[in-house]
Image (cartoon, rainbow, N blue to C red):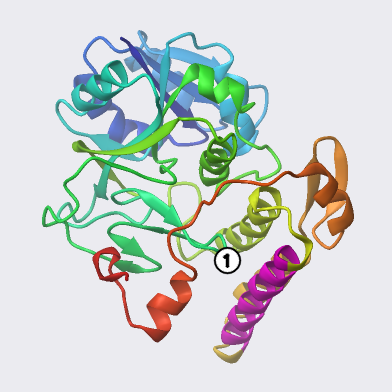
Amino acid sequence: MKIAIVILNWNGLRHLEEFLPSIVKFSDENPIHIIDNNSTDSSVEFIKKYYPKINLIINSKNYGFAKGYNQGLKNIKEEVFCLLNNDVQVSENWLIPVIKEFKNNDSLAIAQPKILDYKNKNKFEYAGAAGGFIDYFGYPYCRGRIFNEIEEDNGQYDQNIDIFWASGACFFIRKNIFEKLNGFDENFGTHMEEIDLCWRLTNLNLDYKKRFIYKSEVYHLGGGSLSYENPKKLFYNIRNHRWMVLKNINAHFFLDNLRLSIIQNFSLLYSLYFLLTFKMKHFIYVIKAMFSVSAKIDGYNVNVVNRNIVLKLKSKKPKYYSIKSIIYHYLIKGQKKYSDLT
């Protein structure tokens, strides 16, 4: 089995210079593809000059994460994709346990390695850590990371387990599954596309597995496209979270509206916090996110407040959550580690 290592790049020359050497060195005979989102720096020239064996796919414009991958992956034929951020350092033999899992388990659709912090390699990294889960309200969290509380890696999560979502920083998926799901939802633009895709896979209600594979380790720099402090990241997270929940939760009018109202109130509290701490850019982006969710569902143009159309398009979905509210566990019960959750 060959895994296609696929890196999406836009003006990432400095990351390519730093991180491509480990990827080339430790990927053995597995092909490397770089999808370039019409970079205006010297990324393309750098790849052609120093890495001529890498398959370079050039998109006609900067499509962002979702559409950038959707466009580029049409040209890649391998059975399994590894969608890898351009700011990830891989370790020796990182692909061996993943290939083994895919070969031995036909029901395995999506997988994630252990993701550690590039700058502090004994700690988990924010974007994925040791595998992702979600609560009743659609708020994501990870083994090893709940909100901004990030744990050291002491082997406490060294077990291969089923997960709800895998991180887009290093995201393994079978090609036929990616195509069955019609790829990433391009309405997201950037942030949470991988969680939505994993959720849609769950909603198919088929016997597909999503797994964390602990013996595979990578190191993620993080904040490569938008830094964690950038208010635009906050905007995308809030907007896309609401869109994801709208699409994927069970079709029950009262509960759906109650759930979305609570999510809206959490966002409102968030905006008040930024207002009171004089972080006006953050405040503005939260407000914009709260009132900007509109997109398409099965060809219909809808807004989140227009529930009637949405409910006609949705059927009952399987249970997706293991706890009711990660915010309650974190703020009220003081449980700031995955292993503490009860």
The vertical placement of 307 against 80, above or below, is below
Secondary structure category for the residue under label 1: helix
What residue do we see at 49% from left, 47% from top?
225
* Left or right of residue 196: residue 219: left
Q: Magenta span: helix, strand or loop, mainly?
A: helix
Name above or below for residue 25 compared with residue 194: above
Whether residue 60 is visible to the viewer of this picture, yes or no, is yes
In the rendered view, does 271 fall on the left or right side of 314?
left
Which residue is under mark 1? 231
Magenta residue span: 255-275
Q: Is residue 38 visible?
A: no
Q: Quadrant of the N terminus?
A: top left
The quarter of the picture where the C terminus appears is: bottom left
Coordinates of residue 191 in the picture (x, y in percent): 55, 49
Residue 333 falls in which quadrant of the image?
bottom left
Tell me if 294 is positioned left or right of 167 in this view.
Answer: right
| Horizontal and vertical percent position of residue 18 | 28, 36
Most extreme residue toward the bottom, as rendered? 276
- Residue 288 point in image, percent of width and height: 74, 67
Instruction: Give the residue type that dot 1 points to.
Output: Pro
Which residue shows up at 72% across the image and 63% down it?
256
Which residue is depicted at the point 54% across and 24% down?
A: 178
